[in-house]
Image: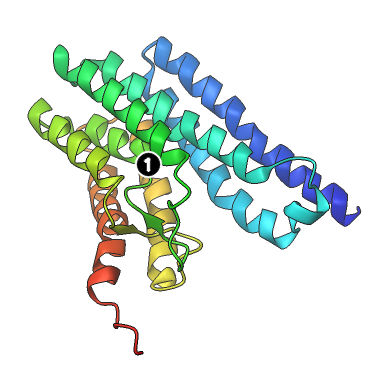
Amino acid sequence: MTLRTKALLVHLFTATGAVFAMLAMLAAVDEKWDLMFLWLVVAFAVDGIDGPLARRYNVKTNAAAFDGVLLDLIIDYLTYVFVPAYALFKSGLLPGWTGWFAIIFITFASAMYFCDTRMKTKDNSFSGFPGCWNMLVIVIFALEPNFWVSLSLVTVLAIAMFLPLKFVHPVRTLRWRPVTLPMALAWTFFAGWAAWVGFHPDSWAHWGLVVTSVYLLFAGVAQQLTERPLRH
């Protein structure tokens, strides 16, 4: 198999995320939330794998006819933003005007963030909350907090998308990667397990979700606070 063929296959692998997004949306329309999240977890796993493969086979050179970055952003918007926002609205976990506020705020702010050319920092972290609403929404489904808590989290994170705060990329942020990458893999496992058991309130996967989510949410900020100032 030639290098160009391998590079093209990476693009095709990335594109499967669009299929998983559609399957998740169909499940969401039928209010099959556990199935919806299982498809989103599969899409999340694909998103974690395709990046290293794209760099390994240098898709920018060997399959240049397709823009892998654009393809990735389109699929990420569907799986990270659009489907989770719909689920949060349709589920009734944010009733009345709060649901409308959340779905409008999430989709609008995320659209602006995804086209922001400043979204990556020099160390390949994200500048601002990277619109991972799938991660927040699955925790809300698992724990079912008071709707004011959910609304506050949505509001704070939407604003944080445009603040100069770091959020780690599990694969590309080198600092603390030996911890961050296993945490991301653990989050994927706990998310899948929580959805598999139908978000049973006694599932131990819920606490695993909370612990890993808190780490992934605040690790970048902790890195910012402990960075050594540059010497001139």
Rendered view: 22 above or below 38 = above
Q: What's the residue at 32%, 51% (across, down)?
A: 128
Q: Position of 227 compared to 94: left or right?
A: right
Rendered view: 142 above or below 34 = below
Residue 65, percent from left and from top: 80, 41
The three-letter code of the residue at mark 1 reads Cys
Q: Position of 30 compared to 221: left or right?
A: right
The answer to which quarter of the image holds residue 204 is top left
Residue that carries the numbered disc 1 in the rendered image: 132
Residue 138, percent from left and from top: 31, 34
Q: What's the residue at 72%, 42% (across, down)?
A: 11
The residue at the far right in this view is 1
SS state under label 1:
loop
Q: Report the front residue among 51 and 43.
A: 51
Q: How many marks?
A: 1
Q: Can the viewer see residue 74 in this picture?
A: yes
Q: What's the residue at 39%, 17% (across, down)?
A: 32
Residue 132, percent from left and from top: 37, 41
Q: Can the viewer see residue 193 in this picture?
A: no
Q: Quadrant of the C terminus?
A: bottom left
The answer to which quarter of the image holds residue 83 is top left
The answer to which quarter of the image holds residue 55 is bottom right
Q: What's the residue at 43%, 72% (across, down)?
A: 178
Q: Looking at the image, what colour scheme do you see?
A: rainbow
The residue at the far front in this view is 232
Q: Position of 62 compared to 169: left or right?
A: right
